Image (cartoon, coloured by chain):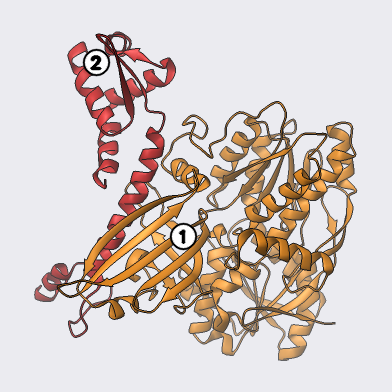
Chain colours: A red, B orange
Amino acid sequence: MHSSAQDAFDALSDPTRRAILDFLARSGEVTAGAIADAVDEVGRTAVSSHLRVLRTCGLVDERKQGRYRYYALAADGPVRDALAFLQSLLNVGVSDAAAMAQPAGLPRQAGDVNPSAAGRRRAG
Amino acid sequence: MQAIALIADSHLAVPPDEAFWLFGRGGQSGWVLGAACDAVRPGVAVSLRLPPGLGSPAAVDILGRIGACVPGRLIEIVHDQPWQGRLRLKFKAAPAGGTRFSVSAELDSSGLAWLMDRRGWAPGAAAGPGGIGPAGADVHRVGLLTSKSGPGAVFAVACDYLARLAVEEINADGGLHGQPVDLVVRDDATDAGRAGLEAGRLAAAGCRAIVASVTSASFEAARCVAGEAGPLLLYPLLNEGGAAGGNVLRWGERPLDQVQAVAGRMMKGTGSRHWYLIGNDYSWSHGAHLAAVQAIESAGGQVVGGAFTPLGTTDFSPVIDGIRASRAALIVSSLVGADEVAFERQAWSSGLRQNCDVLSLALEESTRERVGDDASTGIWTAFGYFEVIEDPGNTELLRRYRAAYGRWAPPISTLSESVYEAILLYAAAVRGAADRSETVRRLQHARASMPRGPVAAAGPGRMSQQLRVARAVPGGFRLVGD
């Protein structure tokens, strides 16, 4: 799950996707065609790939009805994003802890986090 | 949603017993999440730092205490800031050697709402739990602007707990004019700009009153944003004085009274007359130092030096050098929150406290706890309320507080107790008033018997109360008689 925070960052870092999200926030549930019409930067083919990215990281929901697919802001998208954020902080915390928990007897310098980096400093 | 638990784990190269004793060593590189505590046993205050970057512009400090530990196996941290939750660190021997190490974090809907805010999701727009939804027509909404992050998180820690206790009491009594009180809590992150933004949000969300447990800089920003036609603004924390009247009630202890109560006896006790003033570089300390100079000179003392440091300062060695150079043997500190914690710990570890006595204007129970017993013992302070006050109302408040929040909840202090009082005084004024201007008039002349004793508002800018002098001792404060 720790990659989903990064996915959300990637999704939100694209201005076209931000424009799509903004349109969805104002419009409720719409078709891909409606999005392409309303959002200048994006054509019909590009819309689908942007929507796929947004759905993968949980920011947009898709609902199928007959031939049509409707898109809307994921109601719990912000929730998932916030949880993914905390999860990523915990992941960094435990992996840093693993790097710092050295057996007694190996010399440790103050501020060492990565043992291989410490090795490079001593050599240089 | 009750609580969500997230878990992360890793493999450590050392056995569980050794890994366990790495915990809490502190500093910027404190093992696991920057954890720092003075000892690993239940009840000890602990802080952890979640790093900045990765979607958050500033570090996030988790403030709590150790709730349980089993040496070599488990450390459980019960925390209050920035949200109420629990962290569990587990250590298990790995089959092939080393340790299987896991950290789990629990958070409830308020905690999730805080995280969503920190990530930039607009409150309410996300329609998540804990966001600011629209006020129903049949509730009486009251806002609490408090500090759940930043240096002020240390002193504001119990304020929202006491606010909720007051609201529960009011609603148990039938609410206000038949409407239940709905409390909305927002975090200013100890930043005045943020405080203004959040005050605007609270006003837009329909709050009829906002109680602020933030720095006076943040309160001033809130006052400018909320405007005269906005909600009532109540500032019950000790402060340097300032604009009051109209929709603003500014209560709390004043630094002039605090210093006047203590300066003479400190000079008599040490035989010294020379003072140094250290504070934060904003209006609270600027006003406090002016008041301190006045009180000290009236008592026959002399201020021989002073300094202001930016809020958020962590290294006080230049200040400590300055105090040594000034030859002052008496110090007034008006530093607040995490800054005061850092200064007092460094003043102690540098040996400065062997030659200097300290009067700390904002060293309330939670700040003292994080300074620690060794570094805080002997520091003088003066407030209208201490947790150790013997008063039936205080005993009852403490009983209800512990029943609601448990044995590991942070101590109550003059700051959090003043928030409790302010909400009750507001409710009493509303109940007796036909309209808002009458509510304001009643608040300006409010009188009541509170856990701190009798209080009486003398206009919009003053709350009369009995000031008590105390010195820090291990575990809390000892009141000092006349």
**Residue hosting label 1:** B86
Which quadrant, please, contains the N terminus of chain A? top left
Residue B79: x and y in percent read: 50, 61
Residue at the image point whose x is 65% and y is 62% from the top? B285
Q: Which chain carries label 2?
A: A
- Give the left or right position of residue A104, taking residue B21 as reference: left
Left or right: where B441 falls relative to A111: right
User: Dot 1, crowdedness within 10 Å: few (<14), some or many (≥20)?
Assistant: many
10 Å neighbourhood of mark 2: few (<14), some, or many (≥20)? some
At label 1, the amino acid type is Arg
Secondary element under disc 2, as helix, strand or loop, is loop
Q: Is residue B301 above or below residue B5?
A: below
Q: Is residue B313 visible?
A: no
Spatial CA span between label 2 and label 1: 45 Å
Question: What kind of residue is marked 2?
Answer: Val
- Residue B276 is tagged as none
Residue corresponding to mark 2: A42
Relative to A60, residue A28 above or below: above
Horizontal arrangement in the rendering, residue B60 relative to residue A94 (left or right): right
Q: Name the one closer to the observer, B406 or B374.
A: B406
Callout 1 secondary element: strand
Report x, y in % for residue B413.
Answer: 69, 65
